[in-house]
Amino acid sequence: MEIRILQKHEEPPMDLLLLADPSTSLIEKYIKESECVVALVENKIIGICVLLQKDASTVEIVNIAVAAYMQDQGIGKQLVIHAKQRAQKNGFKRLEVGTGNSSISQLAFYQKCGFRITSIEFDYFINHYAEEIYENGIQCKDMIRLSLELE
C-alpha cells in the first residue's frame, strides 16, 4: 500500500468521499481548500483523508473514508497516522475531527487513535444537511468534536 498526497491534476474520489459525508455540495466546498492524503493499492485509490487548516495551530480531518471492501484492515488508522505526521511536520499543534452522534464505530475508532472528545455542536446535521441522516438506527443530529494534541 502506498500513502501519498493527491496531486492537483488528479480528481478526488467522490465515491469514497460520499461514504463519510452524504453532501456533494459540502464536499465540493471544502475539498478546494484542503489537502488530500490517499491510500492506493495497485495504483487504485482505496482510501482518503482530507485535511483542512482551521487556523495557525490546528488542522482538521474533514473527511476520511476507506472503500468498503478494504475496511477493517488498518488503512484508516494508517491515514490518521500519516495526517498526524504531516500536521506535526508542518508545525501544527492540534489535529481535530468531527463525527456524528450516531457514528458509533467512528467514535470508537478516533478514540483508539488517541483523540479525545472536546465538544458537541448541537443540531449540526439538522442545520447543515437537507436530508435526515440515520446510522445504527439513530438520527444523526449532533457533531461530536474530538482532538489530538500533537507533540
Image (tube, grey):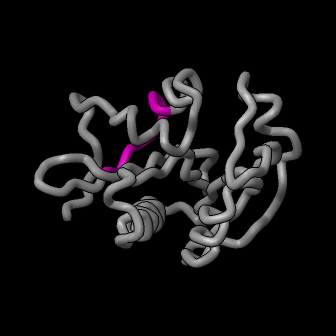
Image coordinates of residue 29 in percent, x first then y, are: 54, 25
Quarter of the image for the C terminus: give it: bottom right
Instruction: Identify the residue at horizontal 57%, vertical 33% (top origin).
Output: 22
The answer to if 36 sits in the magenta stretch is yes
Tell whether 103 sits left or right of 123.
Answer: left
Image coordinates of residue 18 in percent, x first then y, are: 48, 36
Is 44 placed above or below 144 here? above
Quarter of the image for the N terminus: give it: bottom left
Can see residue 110?
yes
Which quadrant of the structure image shows residue 129? top right
Instruction: Identify the residue at horizontal 39%, vertical 62% (top origin).
Output: 71
| Front one among 116 and 150 | 116
Image coordinates of residue 58 in percent, x first then y, are: 61, 55
Is 65 placed above or below 94 here? above
| Front one among 8 and 145 | 145
Is 15 placed above or below 48 here? above
In this picture, which residue range is highlighted in magenta? 31-38
